Image (cartoon, helix red, strand yellow):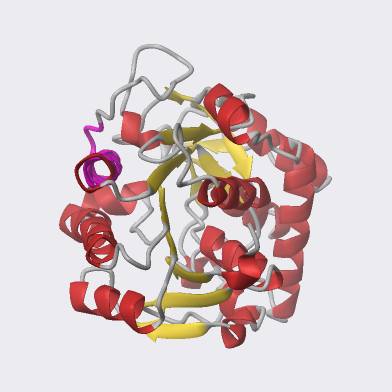
């Protein structure tokens, strides 16, 4: 696909994945529109200056009129729907906000695309392995039905079902991407294991783990996720892709202990033994994905090893922390506890 001829809308553009997706789209020459609710100056999209290369629409996913007007006004042909309330513990405490952003936000985007089906040619919906809920058989394949139980998981299950409904009922060219835990530079949610552990180690502190450290997850580097989303968009109108969900995974699950140890090793601080809080609530213990469908139909495979992705990620955070001129305050940023 020649992206220089595409007019693209990205929701969730100031998030970690959205920031890197927008950068890639801009580098490929796409006319890129971003929906922005808040402009945190520390977000990668803004820090990098890439937001100045986009067309910015200020608004919320919950406002259908804004979404519909944006697609029509900018003649959008490609939509990447990444916008969501994406923090599990936050969803546990404020489920209504999560449901409004993740469920209402998704059907607003899909309905606006349906209304403007004459110009919208492809829609990629970013979902999560959490959409599956706590399935008994591992790894999860796309045949595993969406069965979330906790608020965030339920919101992603609904996201997937809504996307499939619009694909089946209205023949909307939509496809769903399900990833595990995504990591990379620009994630400022310190409760997550990768940024939280990097920050703790950089501060010379012992990282704190909310779980017992034995929870098992996929960890996929953000640049591999961007590759996946672009590949899905490029094939979205094909039979066998349109109306389908795809898992994206390195297929090498690791425990929280192993992930923390890898970060400490790469930062030369293996002496900082993690503090085990074992207080995780509403968390699925073991969850990882089979990505053979993406291999076969999309010819997608991750390009980065875990160490390579972590090395790039650590370098980003070291530059980020150094640019603040002082050590980041745990009081101002929140406690660096990770799963």
159 is within the stretch colored magenta: yes
> Which residue sits at x=74%, y=42%?
264
Quarter of the image with the N terminus is bottom right
The percent position of residue 69, horizontal first and vertical second, equals 27, 80
Quadrant hosting residue 19: bottom right
Q: Is residue 131 visible?
A: yes
* Location of residue 44 with respect to 294 vertically, above or below: below
* Location of residue 66 with respect to 316 vertically, above or below: below
- Give, as a single range, the part of the protein colored magenta: 148-166
Say which of 249 and 273 sits in front. 249
* Location of residue 176 with respect to 99 vertically, above or below: above
Relative horizontal placement of residue 105, taking residue 304 as reference (left or right): left
Q: Is residue 279 visible?
A: no
The percent position of residue 325, horizontal first and vertical second, equals 72, 81
* Location of residue 49 with respect to 238 vertically, above or below: below
The percent position of residue 94, horizontal first and vertical second, equals 21, 56
Quadrant hosting residue 79: bottom left
Q: In the current view of this chain or complex, which residue is farthest to the top?
A: 137
What main secondary structure does the magenta stretch of the protein show? helix
> Which residue sits at x=71%, y=71%?
27
């Amino acid at each position: 696909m020649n992206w220089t001829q595409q007019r693209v809308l990205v929701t969730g553009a100031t998030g970690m994945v959205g920031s890197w997706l927008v950068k890639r789209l801009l580098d490929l020459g796409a006319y890129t529109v971003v929906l922005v609710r808040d402009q945190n100056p520390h977000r990668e999209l803004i820090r990098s200056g890439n937001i100045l290369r986009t067309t910015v629409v200020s608004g919320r996913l919950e406002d259908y009129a804004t979404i519909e007007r944006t697609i029509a006004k900018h003649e959008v042909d490609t939509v990447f729907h990444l916008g969501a309330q994406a923090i599990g513990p936050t969803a546990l405490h404020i489920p209504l906000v999560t449901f409004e952003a993740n469920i209402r936000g998704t059907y607003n985007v899909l309905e606006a695309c349906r209304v403007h089906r004459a110009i919208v040619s492809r829609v990629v919906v970013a979902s999560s392995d959490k959409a599956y809920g706590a399935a008994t058989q591992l790894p999860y394949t796309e045949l595993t039905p969406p069965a979330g139980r906790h608020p965030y998981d339920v919101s992603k299950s609904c996201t997937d079902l809504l996307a499939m409904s619009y694909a089946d009922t209205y023949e909307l060219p939509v496809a769903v991407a399900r990833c595990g835990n995504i990591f990379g530079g620009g994630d400022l949610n310190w409760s997550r294991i990768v940024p939280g552990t990097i920050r703790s180690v950089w501060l010379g502190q012992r990282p704190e783990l909310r779980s017992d450290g034995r929870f098992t997850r996929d960890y996929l580097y953000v640049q591999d996720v961007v590759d996946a989303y672009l590949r899905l968009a490029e094939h979205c109108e094909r039979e066998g892709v349109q109306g389908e969900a795809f898992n994206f995974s390195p297929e090498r699950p690791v425990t929280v202990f192993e992930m923390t140890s890898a970060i400490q090793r790469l930062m030369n601080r293996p002496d900082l033994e993690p503090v085990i809080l074992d207080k995780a609530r509403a968390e699925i213990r073991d969850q990882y994905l089979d990505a053979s469908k993406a291999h076969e139909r999309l010819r997608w495979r991750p390009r980065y090893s875990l160490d390579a992705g972590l090395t790039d990620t650590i370098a980003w955070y070291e530059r980020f922390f150094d640019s603040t001129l002082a050590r980041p305050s745990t009081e101002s940023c929140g406690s660096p506890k990770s799963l």
